[in-house]
Amino acid sequence: MPAPQSVLALIGNTPMVEVTRLDTGPCRLFLKLESQNPGGSIKDRIGLSMIEAAEREGKIAPGKTTLIEATAGNTGLGLALVAAQKGYKLLLIIPDKMSQEKINHLRALGAEIVMTRSDVGRGHPAYYQDMAERLEKEIPGGFWVNQFANPANPLAHETGTGPEIWAQMDGDMDAMVCGVGSGGTLSGLGRYFKKTAPHVEMVLADPKGSILAEASRSGHIGEAGSWLVEGIGEDFIPPNCDLDLVGSAITIDDREAFATVRELLMKEGILAGTSSGTLIAAALRYCRAQTTPKRVVTFVCDSGNKYLSKAYNDFWLQDQGLTAREKTGDLRDLIA
Ligand code: PMP
């Protein structure tokens, strides 16, 4: 097979691997390794789809447009990769709590970074989403990508990720476990399975503190808390998130999510990011609760490389109260 002409051709068509050492009860659990995308996460798919949709609609062109998005996460990396390859300027508005490693990576890909406050909410002029909306109007040729409402986000999963999963599972699966950041994955896959295989249950995996699990069960939008898992969970329902597609929802706390990514690395040899901890913990709970064998799919959304100083650092986990602090010995033993 001839080598692809661009790294962008390597986005998608990610491999799938079965979990064999973790306890999956009567079920079989399969992981789609989105960490194998060239930018390192599931968000490469929407970086490409949102830019190419705007190109097709004649809304943007290299040399004329400045792409704008409010994110420090994987969407920023996906957009930066595609923007650099296609010759677009990219402006990212980033809350100041984000790690320096991520910012260095984005700058190295040519993105311009505007730092803003992370201690203000919607409606404040320094809130990162509101800044993106304003800068689109102020910057000539500005185009706010807006993953939370851009239809090319869920469409990437409806037309790409969904058919890939169905083919890799040989058209035989029962449940799909997803998290929600923008809702693109959940809504896109939900729409695909609704028309292709409506028996496939969409299972929402939500961090404790996020409002989404309760909203999907009862419609009630509660008070949001905080959580340490990155990339999923919300304090609002994004326009791209269609909770009507959710069959059941499972809430996972940080302790269980972090323990799960560590166990995944030890037992299955997969270095996963923290949102994958929430997804896989929820998938394992779902599997173990079944009374008949089912085939279940979830994601490794990104690689654990970005979290080595957090999820994979025992001292950090202890400082966050996520693992018990080990007894460090009694000095009297040394003196005696
Ligand atoms: N996992 C990670 C690591 C992410 O960065 C994101 C996106 N923020 C998600 C999962 C959730 O994806 P979506 O935006 O499609 O809901």
Image (cartoon, rainbow, N blue to C red):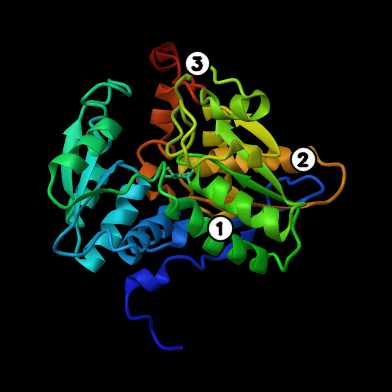
Image quadrant in which you'd find residue 130: top left
Mark identifier at residue 239 = none
User: Left or right: 71 with respect to 200?
Assistant: left
On screen, residue 332 above or below 250: above
Q: Which residue lies at the image location 26% right of the left edge and 56% below the top edge?
A: 80
Distance (Cα) linking label 2 and label 3: 30 Å
- Which is nearer the N-term, disc 1 or disc 2? 1
- In x, y percent, where is residue 198? 74, 53
C-alpha distance separating marks 3 and 1: 31 Å
Query: Disc 1 or disc 2, which is closer to the eye?
Result: 1
Q: Residue at x 60, y 55 (%)?
A: 31
**Amino acid under label 3?**
Glu
Q: Nearer the viewer, residue 239 or 316?
A: 239
Which residue is tagged 3? 223
Q: Amino acid at mark 2?
A: Arg
Q: Is residue 40 visible?
A: no
Residue 281 or 73: which is nearer the viewer?
Answer: 73
> Label 1, on which residue?
158
Image position, residue 110 (x, y; %): 17, 56
Q: Is residue 105 visible?
A: yes
What amino acid type is highlighted by mark number 1?
A: Glu
The residue identified by callout 2 is: 288
